[in-house]
Image (tube, rainbow, N blue to C red):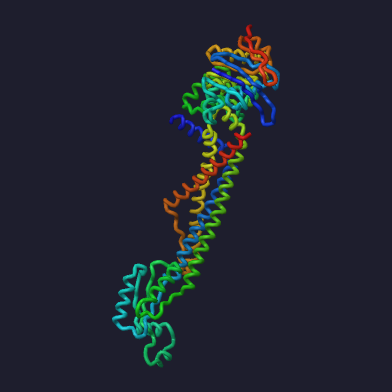
Amino acid sequence: MIEIAGVTRRYPDGREALRGIDLHVEAGEMLFLGGPSGAGKSTLLRVIAGIDRPTRGRVSLNGQELTRLGASAREALRRNIGLVFQDHRLLNDRSVRENAALPLRIQGLSAADVERRVGAALERVGLAARAADSPLALSGGERQRLCIARALVGRPALIVADEPTGSLDQEYSQAILALFRSFNLAGVTLIIATHDERLVQQLEGRLVHMDQGRILSDGRVAR
Amino acid sequence: MMGSLQQQGYALRQALVRLARAPVAHLFTVLVISLSLAVPLVLYRLVSDLGALARAQAGPPQLTVFLRMDASEALITSTRTALQARPDLEAVRYVSPDAALQDIRRSTRMEDVLAGLDGNPLPGAFVVRPRQGEPEGLVTLQKALRALPGVDLVQFDAEWARRLYALGQLSERGVLMLGGVLVAGLLSVVVNTLRLQILAAREEIEVCKLMGASNAFVRRPFVYFGVLQVLLGSLLAMGLAELARWSINQASTDWLAPLGVHLQLQAPDALEWASLLGWAVMMGWLASAATVAAFLRQLRST
């Protein structure tokens, strides 16, 4: 599904966030990107999601080479990827329902479809009762769950999540990871960046450990 | 197609939500836009109708074609025929030497002087009214008439006509310049309001772009917002212009009509109103689209 070959990402200030990354991710896989802050996890996620362009190397998604796509084609590709941000990036002047509906608005779905799919997504993350509330009224865990609902509402085949449990306590973190596990069991490919590898130990999956823009290890984690 | 309609509807709702979020602030913006449109609109109508009134008060331009003293009846007839055949003349009237003398007798108190004359010293003349009153055209016509056989002199008050025409042109140019300045003000209001809206929605735009929103999806609510503001401003401008027209007409009836001056500003017809709306909305659309496009370019480069 995802093929990354020799990817380097250098920022305008000269700093190299990724250095010659090679990675292959199969459809339906659950992959954790581990490593300390500054290891290059977030940059790799952005490159995979087509948000950042690699300085060198090649990234293919379902056979489409991202590096050769124009801006509008990359936008179209991103519409089929669920994104979970570390800082949530919710719109505080909109309701929980409208935040979750945003990807569907971008896709131009009908009002009835939006209503149905948002209702199902909020139900799935346990926020159906808070649909009319402002995100500002939610706790940290609820905000993260809303962010996940927004990522899954478009029924993407791939979800990339950047530190989805970063600001949560142990109990909430486990609930969120259980949610991701359920998506993975339904066939969704998941790539999750986390610096907390203890959480990874609780789930089955593949762990790619990174540091200073390089992959140090790549192996399976079993409970 | 359905997706596009859904997105148009969504964009329009977002624009209305933005307007409803700060109604008082937006009302003032709409008011500024409406004044930018209403002032040149009223002034243009005023200058145009005042010009027509001035031309009416001054009377239609006339040229007097004096024949030679020895002009025969045959020459008078051929000159009349030549004048009547000209497409640039609206009316041709012959004033015989006797009629001219009678006129002078009626309009002056020079009975004694006229009685002392041996004969009638006045030549026959044609008074002609051209179809258009543009001064340069009148001068050309004057030269053409002067070249007719038997014509001694062609007279008209070229200076007066030039002054009246220049005054009208100057007023129209002044209104156009004022209109240009006010329209530039209108565009600046639209662009600045939108810039503030875009800056306030920067986070939202960034999130949408991350999720794969096209530039059109991001641009649409802001363009609707700009167009709605200009549309509301135009409608208000039409109301204000009508109010001003009614007020000027009322004052004219009260103050000028007793003096024999009948000035009534004409209401624009449906086509003029539609042109104003269409033009203003197009300007609003262009200004909004350009502002958002500039922001998206800036966003992409950061």
- Would you say B24 lies left or right of B147 here? right
- Would you say B90 lies left or right of A56 here? left
Residue lying at 68% horizontally and 25% vertically, measured from the top left? A16
Foreground residue, B20 or A90?
A90
Residue lying at 49% horizontally and 21% vertically, measured from the top left? A116
Q: Position of residue A53 (x, y in %)?
A: 60, 27
Quadrant containing the N terminus of chain A in the rendered view: top right
Residue lying at 45% horizontally and 50% vertically, measured from the top left? B273
Work out whether residue B102 can be spotted. Answer: no
- Count of numbered circles on the image: 0
Work out whether residue B125 can be spotted. Answer: yes
Foreground residue, B21 or B122?
B122
Foreground residue, A40 or B224?
A40
Quadrant containing the C terminus of chain A in the rendered view: top right
Q: Position of residue A176 (x, y in %)?
A: 62, 15
A217 versus B235 height, above or below: above
Residue lying at 56% horizontally and 39% vertically, measured from the top left? B293
Q: Position of residue B77 (x, y in %)?
A: 30, 78
Q: Position of residue A173 (x, y in %)?
A: 65, 15
B16 versus B144 height, above or below: above
Foreground residue, A131 or B163?
B163
